[in-house]
Image (cartoon, rainbow, N blue to C red):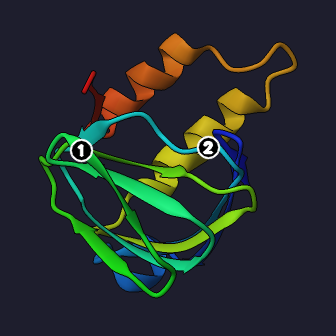
């Protein structure tokens, strides 16, 4: 699936884990990544497979190499960005599950012929406990 300009391939979904967690491989193009945000429902873990990534946490950006795991507990403002010139690939896990439902809804919005209504994306994010902030 393609959402926010990224490719998302689910490894295991909440349906398969009884709602315990969701896991996917996300490929982010150079310069891509979400704006700073926080989750009210999920803890999020990132494992960097390949590429150059910077994570935003505690008000600052920090570069981490492939092979690094980064944990973002719910309630913590965070973001990531592909800081390199090649695709970034990460294994991402959210606990509990449910993120796949948000991505499914976003995919429908991004598939619209005239492009996504970003105000609607922000509204849907809020419905899923995802809130965007200005750093």
Badge 1: few (under 14), some or many (20 or more) residues near its Cα, within 10 Å?
few
Comparing 48 with 19, the one in front is 48
Name which residue lies at 42% across and 34% down: 35
Counting from the top left corner in percent of width and height, residue 105 is at 57, 39
> Disc 2 marks which residue?
32
Comparing 1 with 35, the one in front is 35
Q: Secondary structure at mark 1?
A: strand
Q: Which mark is residue 96?
A: none
Q: Earlier in the sequence, mark 2 or mark 1?
A: 2
> Disc 1 marks which residue?
60
Counting from the top left corner in percent of width and height, residue 132 is at 31, 28
Counting from the top left corner in percent of width and height, residue 133 is at 26, 25
Rendered image quadrant of residue 93: bottom left
8 w.r.t. 118: above or below: below
13 w.r.t. 44: above or below: below
109 w.r.t. 59: above or below: above
Name which residue lies at 33% across and 36% down: 36
Q: Left or right: where does residue 72 sit relative to residue 81?
A: left
- Between circles 2 and 1, the one closer to the viewer is 1
């Amino acid at each position: 699936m393609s959402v926010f300009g990224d490719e998302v391939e689910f490894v295991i979904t909440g349906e398969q884990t009884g709602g315990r967690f969701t896991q996917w491989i996300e490929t982010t193009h150079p310069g891509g990544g979400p704006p700073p945000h926080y989750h009210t429902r999920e803890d999020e873990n990132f494992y960097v497979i390949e590429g150059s990534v910077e994570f935003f946490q505690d008000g600052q950006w920090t570069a981490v190499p492939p092979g690094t795991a980064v944990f973002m507990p719910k309630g913590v403002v965070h973001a990531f960005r592909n800081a390199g010139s090649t695709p970034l690939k990460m294994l991402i896990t959210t606990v509990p599950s449910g993120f796949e439902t948000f991505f499914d809804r976003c995919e429908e919005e991004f598939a619209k012929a005239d492009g996504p209504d970003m105000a609607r994306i922000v509204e849907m994010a809020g419905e899923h406990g995802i809130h965007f902030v200005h750093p």
